[in-house]
Image (cartoon, grey):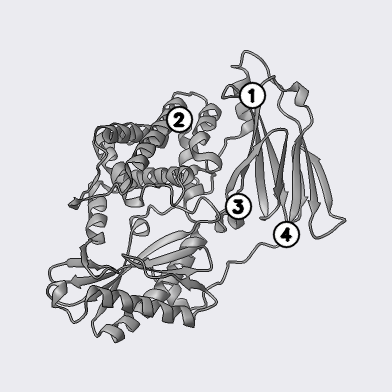
Amino acid sequence: MGSAAGLFYSANDSEKQTLYRRITPSDEQFEEQQDRWNALADHLIADLRARSDYPIRTWLQGSYKTATQIRPVRLSEEFDIDLGVYFRWQGKPQDGRHGPKTLKNFVQESLDAYANANTTEVERVSEPRERCARIQFKSSFHIDVPAYHLDAERDARRLATESGTWEGSDPKAIYVWFRDCFDDLARAKVRRQVKYMKAWAALKFGLNDGRPSSILLTVLVADAAGALGSSNLAADDDTLCGILEHIVERLEEDAEVFNPVDSSENLVRMTDTQVATFIERLKSFLDVARRATAKTEEMAAADIWQESFEHLFPMPDITEALVKAAAQLPVRYIPPEIKVSAVSRTNIAGRFSGVNRIGPIPKDCDISFEITNPLSLPANSQILWTVRNEGREAENINDLGHVAGRGLIAHERSAYRGTHYMDCVVKIGGATVAVRRIPVTITGQEMPRRNPLRQPEWVKLRGRR
């Protein structure tokens, strides 16, 4: 078992700060998404039937359907939900009264009507996209709505495109493929691995920087897990290392990855330069995984894993870990001493200070962290600061932290109720020699759930579709 396995996932303690917990949407976020798509689906079923004179079905698809959705890793990004709408008539797509462009227009008009009737919740409806329409909500997520023809008798579906063609696309088939690849126990492990890969990709690639698609990562991980075999899907850190080895070997041999339910579709939708970058970054990720799984101490392994997962990766009890680690170092290093000062932006009398901790302090304070014993630190040392936020308020706003800078001083702001941490790490030649974890306790009224959906109680009782 890998030494950092407990920091990836905890089966017995859902409240423990693990990588899995930190990248998984909160119960409140799942509830809000469910409320939104339930209400939107009800509207689309009625409205599109009236517009098209055909019966309508809706079906959730994508990462929400396969339970591999992750939270946005940056405040500027959003949750993405895919809600397919299916215009039902018997026969081929060409046998219907409407062409693909008309169906796309129906969906766009229907979303506009929903947005106009729900201005407190909806941010806007985007311009038509080639394969879907998009409605953005004010609470950091959007719903993509692709339109399909469905012949239920043949269980056959085709996607309507903005360019006026019918495109082969079967989201149900890919879901069934993923579901049937593994038994329940193995599938749960593979889902976690998909989420780890997606979190890594979101951190290391911008949205328009050749980021590998969710379906590509899902297929790569599932194929690698299948090659490893269910009996070798053990501790999550060791399993991730094994999966990365398989993926790198596969892509270096052949960079094409075909859809497992449509062998004509290459899921690698990147330029040659982007493919090369993807493989190189995967190799760096594999190097991190190999170095981390070779460590016998949890702290040492966690320190390496955060090279790939940054602020999303939790740190163990640093005090206990450093006592163990210090005994193995050839030189005893003195940890940094941190002076912490906070000044309220809204109250001139609001000034606070502490050493190696601060709080309770109110929200909306400017906070300074300054090392007061720089001469005690080793020569040529690098000092890195990382914010790790915890608690419901930070989770629901998708702000779990960030890399806060380098040097003797760091600056931050208090924003969320709870106890959060500024981690100050001292490195020499890439190796961590000293760490100081500074708790920052923040009080104040918790921000309410944004734009709560006012619906009858019976709506909230429905499960995922």
Q: Which residue is mark 1?
A: 323
Measured along the vertical axis of the image, is residue 190 above or below residue 89?
A: above
Q: Which residue is mark 3?
A: 391
Q: Is residue 14 left or right of residue 108?
A: right
Amino acid carrying mark 2 in the image: Val
Q: Are marks 1 and 4 in contact (CB under 8 Å)?
A: no
Q: Residue furthest top?
A: 330
Nearer the observer, 339 or 2: 339
Q: In the rendered structure, which disc, 1 or 3, sits on the residue that comes first in sequence? A: 1
Quadrant of image for the C terminus:
bottom left
Q: CA distance from mark 3 to mark 2?
A: 28 Å
Q: Which residue is at a point 57% across and 35% down the rendered structure image? A: 316
Label 4, residues with CA under 10 Å away: few <14, some 14-19, many ≥20: some
Q: Which residue is mark 2?
A: 288
Label 1, residues with CA under 10 Å away: few <14, some 14-19, many ≥20: few
Amino acid carrying mark 1 in the image: Val
Amino acid carrying mark 4 in the image: Gly
Q: Which residue is mark 4?
A: 444
